Amino acid sequence: MNARLKSHPARFRTMSEADVDNIMAIELMAYPFPWTAQIFTDCIRAGYACFVLERDIELVAYGVLSAAAGEAHILNICVSPDAQGEGLGRRMLRRLIDAARWHRAERVYLEVRPSNPNAIALYDSEGFNEIARRPNYYPAHKGREDAVIMARELLAEEE
C-alpha cells in the first residue's frame, strides 16, 4: 500500500523575490553551474516574464523569459530533479511560449547544452529547431561547452 498522499495539480504563478531561496535550492541540485540568486532577482526586477510552478505548497519548476522588439528568449527553465519526468518541463515551456505570444513576439530563442539530450528532445518536440551553435558558451568541468541555439516561429492563431 502506498502511504503517499495524492498531490494536487501543479499551478502557475508569477515568481517573486520571496521565491528566490527555494529556486536556488533547486538550481543548485539541478545544475553544476547554476545561476546566482542575484540573477533571478535582477530578472524579476527588470520585469521579465518569470513564473514558478507549485504543487501543494512546494515549488517544483520555474522559468524566465525576456521579450522585446518582436522576439523572446527563454533564459532559464528548470524542474526540480525530484519532479522530472512528469511533464512539468513541457508545461513550463508552453507557459513561457504563451507569455512570448502575449508580448507579441514572432519568434522564441533559447540556448541548450548539447550534453542535455532530454531538453533538446523536449524543445524539438515543441517545434524548436537548431539554427546555430555558440562555441565555448557554457562553463564545463573540463573547460567550456558549446551552446545549441534553437528557435521557434510563433504563428498568429497557433494552438
Image: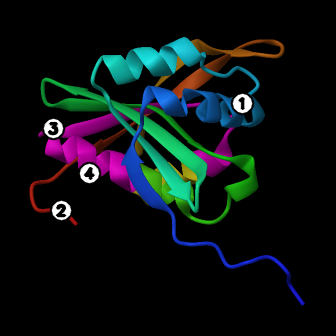
Measured in 3D between alpha carbons, the distance from the residue under mark 3 to the one under mark 2, in whole angstroms, is 15 Å
Query: In screen coordinates, is 157 left or right of 22?
Result: left
Indicate the amino acid at tag 2: Glu
Indicate the amino acid at tag 3: His
Q: What element carries label 4?
A: helix
N-term-proximal mark, 3 vs 4: 4
N-term-proximal mark, 2 vs 4: 4
| Residue displayed at 41% across by 14% down | 42
Q: In this view, does 120 lie above or below 149?
A: below
Say which mark, if any, is on residue 98: 4
Q: Give the range drawn in magenta.
A: 94-119
Point out residue 85 in the picture as x, y percentages from the top left corner: 67, 62
Quarter that holds the C terminus: bottom left
Query: In screen coordinates, is 108 left or right of 33?
Result: left
N-term-proximal mark, 1 vs 4: 1
Disc 3 designates what residue? 103
Disc 1 designates what residue? 31
N-term-proximal mark, 2 vs 1: 1
- Mark 2 touches mark 1? (CB < 8 Å): no
Indicate the amino acid at tag 4: Asp
| Residue displayed at 23% across by 38% down | 107
Is residue 105 or residue 83 the one in the foreground?
Answer: 83
Q: What element carries label 3?
A: loop
- Mark 3 touches mark 1? (CB < 8 Å): no
N-term-proximal mark, 3 vs 2: 3
Disc 2 designates what residue? 158
Indicate the amino acid at tag 1: Tyr
Point out residue 103 in the picture as x, y percentages from the top left corner: 15, 38
